[in-house]
Amino acid sequence: MPLHGSNEYRAFRRDLHRHPEPAWCEFYTTARIVSALRERDLTALHVGADALATGDRMHVPGDDELSEWEVRAREAGADPDVVDQLSGGYTGCVAVAERGDGPVVGLRVDIDALPIAESDSPDHVPAAEGFRSENEGYMHACGHDAHATMGLATLDSVLDSEFAGTLKVFFQPGEEQVAGGRPMAESGHLDDVDHLFAVHIGLDHPSGEVVCGIDGFLAVRHFLAEFTGESAHAGARPEAGRNAVQAMAAAVQNLYAIPRHADGPTRVNAGVVGGGTATNVIPEESYIEGEVRGATTELADYASEHADRILTSAAAMYDCDVEVATKGEAPSAKSDGALADVVGAVAADADGVTSILDRGDLGGSEDATYLMQRVQDRGGLACYVGIGTDHPSGHHTDEFDVVEDDIAVGVDVLAGAIRRVGAGEL
Amino acid sequence: MPLHGSNEYRAFRRDLHRHPEPAWCEFYTTARIVSALRERDLTALHVGADALATGDRMHVPGDDELSEWEVRAREAGADPDVVDQLSGGYTGCVAVAERGDGPVVGLRVDIDALPIAESDSPDHVPAAEGFRSENEGYMHACGHDAHATMGLATLDSVLDSEFAGTLKVFFQPGEEQVAGGRPMAESGHLDDVDHLFAVHIGLDHPSGEVVCGIDGFLAVRHFLAEFTGESAHAGARPEAGRNAVQAMAAAVQNLYAIPRHADGPTRVNAGVVGGGTATNVIPEESYIEGEVRGATTELADYASEHADRILTSAAAMYDCDVEVATKGEAPSAKSDGALADVVGAVAADADGVTSILDRGDLGGSEDATYLMQRVQDRGGLACYVGIGTDHPSGHHTDEFDVVEDDIAVGVDVLAGAIRRVGAGEL
Amino acid sequence: MPLHGSNEYRAFRRDLHRHPEPAWCEFYTTARIVSALRERDLTALHVGADALATGDRMHVPGDDELSEWEVRAREAGADPDVVDQLSGGYTGCVAVAERGDGPVVGLRVDIDALPIAESDSPDHVPAAEGFRSENEGYMHACGHDAHATMGLATLDSVLDSEFAGTLKVFFQPGEEQVAGGRPMAESGHLDDVDHLFAVHIGLDHPSGEVVCGIDGFLAVRHFLAEFTGESAHAGARPEAGRNAVQAMAAAVQNLYAIPRHADGPTRVNAGVVGGGTATNVIPEESYIEGEVRGATTELADYASEHADRILTSAAAMYDCDVEVATKGEAPSAKSDGALADVVGAVAADADGVTSILDRGDLGGSEDATYLMQRVQDRGGLACYVGIGTDHPSGHHTDEFDVVEDDIAVGVDVLAGAIRRVGAGEL
Amino acid sequence: MPLHGSNEYRAFRRDLHRHPEPAWCEFYTTARIVSALRERDLTALHVGADALATGDRMHVPGDDELSEWEVRAREAGADPDVVDQLSGGYTGCVAVAERGDGPVVGLRVDIDALPIAESDSPDHVPAAEGFRSENEGYMHACGHDAHATMGLATLDSVLDSEFAGTLKVFFQPGEEQVAGGRPMAESGHLDDVDHLFAVHIGLDHPSGEVVCGIDGFLAVRHFLAEFTGESAHAGARPEAGRNAVQAMAAAVQNLYAIPRHADGPTRVNAGVVGGGTATNVIPEESYIEGEVRGATTELADYASEHADRILTSAAAMYDCDVEVATKGEAPSAKSDGALADVVGAVAADADGVTSILDRGDLGGSEDATYLMQRVQDRGGLACYVGIGTDHPSGHHTDEFDVVEDDIAVGVDVLAGAIRRVGAGEL
């Protein structure tokens, strides 16, 4: 990070860390990124609705919740003009820098945070050094603050070097809910990308280790099933009710019993359920927030079709209605070997890299796959890179943290790889 | 039983007892009754298909089973010409005797037996005295042999007395499966009946006790639900199956959970279930033989509608088909007080009657209710009479038996009541 | 209400109506009643812990909630010394007035309110006349404000007349949760009561109608089942979880399938359920707030034993733990005819009474039954009296209200009956 | 097959094909094999109980069924003295031929048949050429007649050549039920085996193809769960029953919902279920014949433990008892590469071999794994060899057949491999 110096990037990362925001509420985060990008020499900067296929957004919070986060962002000092642009939950942005003839290379980073209350232990560096979350109950517990910083610093590094071509950096909202990948993938901004990199820090890889190409993304669909029946007094008129909790329970029992598939792993979970209003009232409403996954997109679709049929039939069984909405979704994907090879070659020469793995398995879900798939479907290549860091506790825990120096390792590897593919060295 | 003497009736009853036959297989029984009736001076005798709305028959056995019983009846000496008339499972008959002007009075008795192996204990009178069941595995364990005998003897008694009017005796098949009441009720022969009596012996009432009017019939529906899915190898292609046993199990669980009804008792039972072919094959077929009941016809309908929806939805849940057939059915009914009063008045003078109860509760189901309802719907009156007997063990057990002298008590009470209503003494 | 005048009672009732409080939080209400009672000439006044078998309290809120209501009561002007006595959720009181030789007569009234937001419609009298609930979200929607007022006014009326004996008025907390009856019944204060009256206003009976003796109380048990399993990432380690939502769903399905009982109606409801934390996490915790009922205490016990076994087995099925706590309970009970006859005789002469019903069916649950049973078990008599009122909307709805003049009808009937039994006129 | 000529082997195979027998009923088959072996120059021949750890037999039919098959075998001409030795279901045998110093080499073949009615289509060779099954309803539909023939012919071939060492041929009963592998593995006869070969014909590989080492055996457990409750009249006393069908249905629903395991595939199937006696009787008995599988023995154990807990808890939920018996079982296993290499080398030179696959996946279950594991656990090597054949229809279908010439290919490959490992050419 020669140009702007690591102090700037550290401050930038810590600022984001202090202001963690969930899906579609990344008002402060986006504004902060946009402010920084405006200081760069860009060809274009697409903000908010201009960066998204807005109709494809999933899992958008209600207006009240959006407003609350918007107000909070303004109070925290976000540029009010930028926040105006983002209003209504249109967060994220795409930076475009054209530098003469050459391929279009993309880098995707995600920017959202998690609903986890951050540790205030003195052993937790953000707490000890004063950049712990100021949005109580929310936390950058998956390193997206580092990802956004890598996006900015990699842009700087590439633009500060001999690079012929176009670089696009995608600052994607709503990854944790697998809610933001599709609208960004469908925005049109991916359509001319020849080579796409995505990056994740940590993933149980230590500092100094680089995973050149990650596969093993489970395709996933998050759903919300809302059952509606009819209430009645449970003692006086039990027959007058249409019991939404019975419908929900029948659905739960049978969802987990979706037949296994010989082609590969599937998953089902009824993660959050609820229903009913009072002990003595036949429940009128209930819901299931659940998910299905598959080792391939086809396997997830298989499980998803079964889930839909079970939810519908369980409702019918109790004369209830059910609405099933998709709240998040991501396909499976594979990293292209050609790009992974480039990453490996760059990493071999990079400072701070002590271990290089050709391949790795995510073993979870991620909606970078939407962007990867978009590029691959149009003939391009895509690669998901892992940058190790000694994180003191697991992802999605309240003491997760990254080693800040490893951000620079990621920037070196990504910028190097982008330069190489820009130069056609594939 | 003055005319023909009790010896004849005893022989008749024991002959029927030796040849118990299940629903729609009462070939020997019907032929024996018809032979006896042909010796009487009747206006008309409707046999088999002429006694039934044939399309309303329920729970008819397959052709092989029917044939087997038909052959057995012929071998046991049934009149072959009558058996020809009954062929195909058209059993039962209606005897009509017109005796001048007066009301049309009906008497309904049932004639079928149960799939119970009769005791061969020396304490069991039919075994000791040589008229134990010759159709191994079947038994008159509910006294219908006595009922048929009462039907014949009451006819004799009424015709041998001053009776002005028309007497119709309905020898109904298939009561145990609640399968024969509807086709006889819909036959047309009930349509001009002004007053209908039905009778049951025993019911835990001792010898000498008469119950003038029985109520408390649970309306009932027997159903057979057959699920069809698709088989697949459970190890190699679990996803290729559509699992009929999962559908059945989901149905069973939810059938019992049909909401209770504040208006009165309901019942549900999945009495016989099965499915599947091999441990390692996803089951393609399954079935439930079940029933629903209600204290009123409305309550049984309520439970029945829920059951249908649950069966259909459980099939849909596993992408299976289901066919639900009604295999037996009976409504609820109430005895008319005016007829019960006549029974009480007659019983007060009858030999052998030592206790008279105005009312009793059946607490079970019975398809005499179809005939009662038919008469009542058209403005007539109906009454279900209980004739006590010291039965040594419970109904539907292998040592059930009746005290033969109590048959004569029933005949006296029924014939007396028929004469009174014939004479307009209501 | 001759002595103190109806204005005082109206003000008293409206004051209680403005301050509705749920079970064990009746700090203001109890303090207000105690303050009024202290102005009367009583032999004894047992307050809070002295009025209860404290270990038998059910469904006691957490300390935070109790404190909040206590503070609110103090802010609303409740006598701080009395509130001190009630601190910790020991609400309710028992007033004792000895007036020479004679039987001990009890009157039980309940004092708690419901978690219902009161209507602010101008058609709703409390809203129009300025005594709508000041505890937003809570409401006297079942007339317990009128009951408490009847308790006070009946005491005044009896003491103001020729009454020989002892009168005890039980101001019982926590009826809506069937949580307060047992601790008051077990307090010892019922043990010398010879005759107990309880009273309810409304119940769909119009103004002017008195129901002398109410039966048909469904015995009830409220339970809270809390399941604990183990969480795991639903995608990465599904086998590592022990799924508390699957356990809960299995329990729900099978709870509703508890077999019907031939002896009479039972009820089951899983009224409020929930579980899980996130779509992608195997749920570690879940709960069911449910109830079972029976037409008799035995039938409720039958259903309760089945429920316990099902909850335990469902937890075991998923290797989870479950704790099942009883949160409320009430037996069935019957009004004694002798007392009901006294009520009828008094009502026949009472002003404003235009219709007298000997008997009525509650068709729901009520924990006055604990007090009734206590008295009856020790040889006394008990009677639950209904006082009609033209309530504009149903009990437990946000526009429920009573006609204030009907409170006086209740007082006349109750005081008259208490005087009669005091005089031995049974 | 130079020594005895292919005619003898063809006749032998066709004789076995005409007399298919299920697990533990292979009386004719074993007797026929023993008769043939007695004509060979063996060191030892262990028959029936001498070939088995008799206490480890699983899924043994009842005495009546065993007797019936024994009688049938005698009638078909089996050597009565041998049948005497097998009486009681102790089938199978082990042939031992010592030929000087050298390793102990084993060959395992299975000999039982399936409950499938064989096609009588003229297109089906056994039907056209007169060796269709004479045990109607049973069929060699998996090629075990060919396996037994290979066992005999390979023995001949090896003994007819330069072979130094000991050859043991295991003719194993009860493979289709995974019932016979364990008792033979535990017999002691495997304990000195240094190298074990097992073989299967077909498996969708064409004539001329050899699979040197097969893996991918799913570990499996077959279980029979028998539930016992208490019957009651469904209309009159529903509460008096303890419903074994509800218990079974709850078990079925939850068995399929056993959580997936991240370490690899598992399977569950409730393949055959049933219960109950009559529509109007609360079911007293029910059963599930089911299975669990796993890609490894550990995974099958995981599923098996869950299944046991679910079966037990489902019974407890309905106050029923359940007995769970293991009816068949097999672990997973892997072929050793060193032996597979030997097979490959031999196959490369064998007549009739046109395609050689190093590895293959069974994708199903097989209890040769018990014998393989026994040898491997004691430091030996094991290898499961596939011999292709153009089977006209799938395994376990009624037109399955093998190309008889492919038996000779198998013999050449196996005998060649045995000679090589005998000679230490590993």
Image (cartoon, coloured by chain):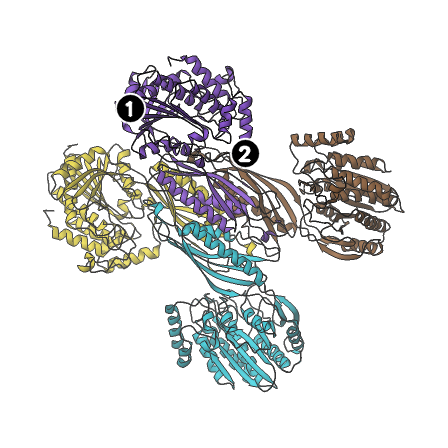
Chain colours: A yellow, B brown, C cyan, D purple
| Quarter where residue D49 is shown | top left
Q: Mark 2 or 1, which is nearer the eye?
A: 1
Image mark 1: chain: D
Graded by Cα atoms within 10 Å as few (under 14), some (14 to 19) or many (20 or more), the crowding at tag 2 reads few
| Quarter where residue C191 is shown | bottom right
Quarter placement of the N terminus of chain C: bottom right
Q: Which residue is mark 1?
A: D102
Q: Amino acid at mark 1?
A: Gly
- Relative to D169, is A92 on the left or the right? left
Q: Which residue is mark 2?
A: D63
Q: Amino acid at mark 2?
A: Asp
* Spatial CA span between label 2 and label 1: 43 Å
Mark 1 falls on what kind of element?
Answer: loop
Graded by Cα atoms within 10 Å as few (under 14), some (14 to 19) or many (20 or more), the crowding at tag 1 reads some
Using the image, determine if residue C331 lies above or below residue B100: below
Q: Position of residue C167 (x, y in %)?
A: 56, 81
